[in-house]
Image (cartoon, helix red, strand yellow):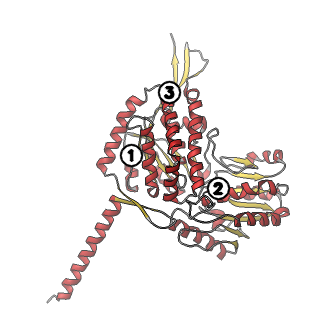
């Protein structure tokens, strides 16, 4: 005979299954954003259904048939409208950015201003970049034309919610493509605000659309015939998955992935002149930058002076409400990110590293941390530390410094500080990274191509290279 308790237990199990199914369904259909500084709920969004995603793909495809024929001068005129909208809405957009991912408000404002500068660069140069290149051959006429590919899918991160998107979208749309954006879920408000900016600027419907899609939909989107290429800024793991899927479909991809940039401090470096830049190279955006200086490789003759000046400058950073203009460093964008950083540092301590300052996490806040006695076997040397952690390595000679800098699976950029810039420039070919900066932090500039090597990705954004990232470089040969 079956007991009443048995039936009761079976019913409870049944309801638990139903609750789990309901919870999973809600997670897939709803998306909530939170303020990382105070934990407050910001907004609840409805994710796009498969039918909605299909509609957006079709709208993009239909728009491309006409957009690709729009004169470049007309597209450039819309860029000016977009810059004007960014300028008018700078305060509200900056506040949204700060509330969603915790960036200090002055840095949010600077990010919007950098997007305006980017647009201005392409206003001035797009027609030249996209004009046919005449080639002297045996033909009556031969040239290279640059034709847009179609609908480009962009998968973007949260750390620079406007800049990362704009540096993809501006050259891509101006070249005649249309764009679909799958942004990081914690900056969904920024993603929708960007879509509205393009609408307010007068871009035709379908030129730029935001997808509030679950990550499970990404592979399906890449598989779709309407999507012609994909651009990802994100982690190494995400890059491998996206590259594999794009490769399976024989579609072009551009990957800008992680980094653990070396900052080499040579014995003749002018610390008084450059210490502010060196600190900013690690602590800007609360250390949440792929191109941040993460490994500080210091020649022993200047080591003590560097530690003293660097520590003093880092300790002067002010933590507080990111909406306060006096705040110079804030929390990380999510609690789990701070937990990961804490774990990387602790694992390095267990292997013999020493904490000079910092390493006391409080929720999403991880304080500026300087860790010394670092060796190449520690996580703070081998991995990407996405937060305000400076790993300091003492070396005896200049040769050892360059060799140590190259000891990395990443390849975004290296910076060198030295009074002998000519000697530093002679070492450029020794570093396999995508960038080499002397007496300056590695940074992106619309006038220069940007991208990495090794597991930091492939392809280039910005400059002319970024504009040609998603075009068909077509050979045309005409005889009479």
User: Looking at the rendered structure, which numbered label has been put on residue 150?
Assistant: none
Q: Is residue 147 above or below residue 345?
A: above
For the residue pair 420 and 249, the one nearer the viewer reads as 420
The Cα atoms of the two marked residues, 1 and 2, are separated by: 34 Å
Tell me which label, 1 or 2, sits earlier in the chain: 1
Q: Which of the 4 image quadrants contains residue 422?
A: top right
- Name the spot of residue 114 as percent of width and height, x first: 59, 44
Of the 4 image quadrants, the one containing the N terminus is: bottom left
Q: Which residue is mark 1?
A: 223
In what element is the residue under mark 3? helix
- Name the spot of residue 115 as percent of width and height, x first: 56, 43
Residue displayed at 64% across by 38% down: 447
- Name the spot of residue 12 as percent of width and height, x first: 24, 79
What crowding class fits label 1: few (fewer than 14 Cα within 10 Å), some (14-19), or many (20 or more)? Answer: some
Tell me which label, 2 or 3, sits earlier in the chain: 3
- Name the spot of residue 223 as percent of width and height, x first: 38, 46
For the residue pair 478 and 81, the one nearer the viewer reads as 81
The Cα atoms of the two marked residues, 3 and 1, are separated by: 30 Å
State whether residue 100 appears in this view: yes
Report the mark closest to the observer, 3 or 1: 3
Number of dots carrying numbers: 3
Q: Is residue 425 above or below residue 373?
A: above
Residue displayed at 34% across by 38% down: 59
Q: Which residue is mark 2?
A: 292
For the residue pair 300 and 431, the one nearer the viewer reads as 300
Kindly indicate whether the residue at mark 2 contacts the one at mark 1 (C-beta within 8 angstroms).
Answer: no
For the residue pair 358 and 104, the one nearer the viewer reads as 104
In what element is the residue under mark 1? helix
The Cα atoms of the two marked residues, 2 and 3, are separated by: 35 Å
Tell me which label, 3 or 1, sits earlier in the chain: 3
In what element is the residue under mark 2? loop
Q: Which residue is mark 3?
A: 72
């Amino acid at each position: 005979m079956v007991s009443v308790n048995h039936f009761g237990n079976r019913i409870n199990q049944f309801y638990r299954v139903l609750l789990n199914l309901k919870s999973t369904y809600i997670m897939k259909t709803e998306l909530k954003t939170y303020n990382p500084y105070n934990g407050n709920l910001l907004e609840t969004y409805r994710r796009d259904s498969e039918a909605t995603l299909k509609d957006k793909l079709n709208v993009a495809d239909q728009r491309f048939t006409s957009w690709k024929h729009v004169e470049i001068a007309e597209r450039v005129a819309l860029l000016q409208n977009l810059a004007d909208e960014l300028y008018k809405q700078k305060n509200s957009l900056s506040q949204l950015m700060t509330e969603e991912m915790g960036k200090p408000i002055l840095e949010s404002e600077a990010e919007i201003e950098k997007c305006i500068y980017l647009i201005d660069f392409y206003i001035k140069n797009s027609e030249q970049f996209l004009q046919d290149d005449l080639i002297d051959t045996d033909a009556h006429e031969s040239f290279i034309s640059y034709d847009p590919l179609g609908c480009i899918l962009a998968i973007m991160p949260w750390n620079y919610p406007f800049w990362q998107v704009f540096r993809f979208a501006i050259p891509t749309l101006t070249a005649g493509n249309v764009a679909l954006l799958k942004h990081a879920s914690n900056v969904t408000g920024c993603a929708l605000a960007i879509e509205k900016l393009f609408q307010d600027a007068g871009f035709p419907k379908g030129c730029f659309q935001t997808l509030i899609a679950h990550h499970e939909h990404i592979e399906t989107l890449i598989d779709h015939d309407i999507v012609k290429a994909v651009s990802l800024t994100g982690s190494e793991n995400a890059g491998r998955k996206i590259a594999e899927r794009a490769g399976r479909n024989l579609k072009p991809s551009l990957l800008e992935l992680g980094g653990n940039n070396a900052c080499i401090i040579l014995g003749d470096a002018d610390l008084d002149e450059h210490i502010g830049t060196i600190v900013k190279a690690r602590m800007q955006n609360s250390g949440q930058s792929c191109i941040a200086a993460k490994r500080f490789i210091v020649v022993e003759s200047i080591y003590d002076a560097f530690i003293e000046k660097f520590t003093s400058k880092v300790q002067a950073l002010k933590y507080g409400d990111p909406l306060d203009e006096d705040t110079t460093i804030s929390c990380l964008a999510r609690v789990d990110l701070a937990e990961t950083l804490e774990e990387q540092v602790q694992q390095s301590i267990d292997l013999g590293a020493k904490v000079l300052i910092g390493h006391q996490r409080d929720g999403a806040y991880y304080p500026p941390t300087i860790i010394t006695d670092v060796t190449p076997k520690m996580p703070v040397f081998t991995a990407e530390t996405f937060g305000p952690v400076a790993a300091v390595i003492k070396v005896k000679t200049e040769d050892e410094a360059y060799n140590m800098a190259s000891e990395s699976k990443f390849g975004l950029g290296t910076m060198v500080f030295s009074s002998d810039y000519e000697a530093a420039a002679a070492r450029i070919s020794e570093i396999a990274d995508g960038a080499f900066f002397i007496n300056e932090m590695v940074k992106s500039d619309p006038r220069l191509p940007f991208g990495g090597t090794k597991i930091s990705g492939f392809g280039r954004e910005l400059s002319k290279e970024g504009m040609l990232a998603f075009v068909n470089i077509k050979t045309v040969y005409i005889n009479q």
